Image: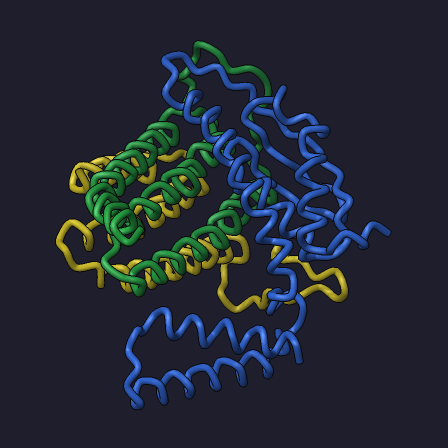
Chain colours: A green, B yellow, C blue
Amino acid sequence: MGDLFANIADFWGMVRFPLGAALCLGGGILCLIGSVGVLRFPDFYTRLHAASITDTAGAILILLGMGLMAPGWLVVSKLVAIFVFLFLTGPASSHAAANAAHTAGLQPVIGPIGQRSDDDDEAA
Amino acid sequence: MTAAALIALLIGMLLLLIRAIAGPTLYDRVLAVNSFGTKTVLALGLLGFVMGRPEFLDIAILYALINFVATIAILKFFRYRSFQVPLVRRGGQGGGNNG
Amino acid sequence: MAYFLGLLVALVGFWLGMSGHFSPLLLTFGAVSVAVCLILAYRLDIIDREGAPYVRILGYAMYFPWLMKEIVKANITVIRACVKADLDIVPALVKVKTTCRTDLAKVTFANSITLTPGTVTVEVEGDKMLVHALYEQEAQPEAFEDMDRRSRIAADGKGADA
């Protein structure tokens, strides 16, 4: 029985670094995709959606990957703190930006946008 | 592989800088800077792990807090043109800084 | 008093999680910091249901996995929209009515909408919310009913319908 637990512990110690690194890489690529979306999307409100990929999926994957590679519980608790901060402040600042733009009278582009990714300057 | 993740993050931050410089409206710039800050938090954490010194996470926590406050402060300044306006709670309704 | 205790436990846990040292000197510093934070919070008059919502932590713990699932589902849609060669998005502004009564429930609901990629809460006015969505067909008011109900249960408890 103890042998089995030792085996599982060995296996876990072997697999957690590659797994964590892979999760970090996936999160990094998602952050890159979010940035590409911020560059590509036509107006401010749609860019908010692209930015929220970074805030949610990228952050979750990278923090999870770092948690798997963490050397001790202290690091894990700090990662949890960062996770909580990002999840409380991310939507608050997104909403603040959207609300400020809406109050200032910035009109969103409504309706289907297809095949014309070049009309970038929706200055309002 | 962690270094590759860090490089992907840095390229993403570079693309966001383009949006922050080119963005047609103020809010695009604020959004780009805010997203840049989130990526900086993640990049600081990853940098610590790449260099084998996870103590960098302390700086990342601090940056996460500063990033939020900075976004709100910029938005407030461009709304009221002053930092002196109090963000009071409206009586009974509670609610944040909408309106 | 319960809110006070909740804030105390949270602050002590935060200090221990950040520092990781247990020498008497650092523990004294921690106690002083926690005491100063509590005094400041008391003077700011924010030790209430919103300032220390740890009473509802079980409800939020049950709400969180469902929110994660929604975030993953919505992420796939938005990532596909980001990397597709031709841009085919249908942005729309949708009005959503919420059944949440308290501010905490409304904040939970609005933050959940904003946290889900593809939808952003633009304005909150009473019990109506203005939501900007990336795809019009996926943001009909019916799509938010489930999230509305779950966040109300998470923040208010089951008996808070009226």
Residue A100 lies left or right of residue A84; in this view the side is right
Residue B25 lies left or right of residue C112; in this view the side is left
Q: Quadrant of residue B5?
A: top left
Identify which residue, B49 or A11, lies in the foreground: A11
Rendered view: C141 above or below C22: above
Q: Which residue is at 44% across, 72% downward?
A: C13
Identify which residue, A33 or C75, lies in the foreground: C75
Q: Which residue is at 57% across, 53% downward?
A: C61
Rendered view: C109 above or below C117: below
Q: Residue furthest right?
A: C162
Residue A52 lies left or right of residue B18; in this view the side is right
Q: Residue furthest top?
A: A115
Identify which residue, A20 or A6, lies in the foreground: A6
Please provide percent x and percent y for residue A63: 34, 48
Q: If the image is split into quadrants, where does the N terminus of chain B sit?
A: top left
Q: Residue furthest front?
A: A1
Q: Which residue is at 75% across, 38% downward?
A: C97
User: Can residue A123 be seen?
Assistant: no
User: Can residue A97 be seen?
Assistant: yes
Please provide percent x and percent y for residue C137: 63, 19
Please provide percent x and percent y for residue C18: 34, 70
Q: Which residue is at 61% across, 78% downward?
A: C4
Rendered view: A81 above or below A66: below
Number of marks in the rendered image: 0
Please provide percent x and percent y for residue A13: 22, 48
Q: Quadrant of residue B30?
A: top left
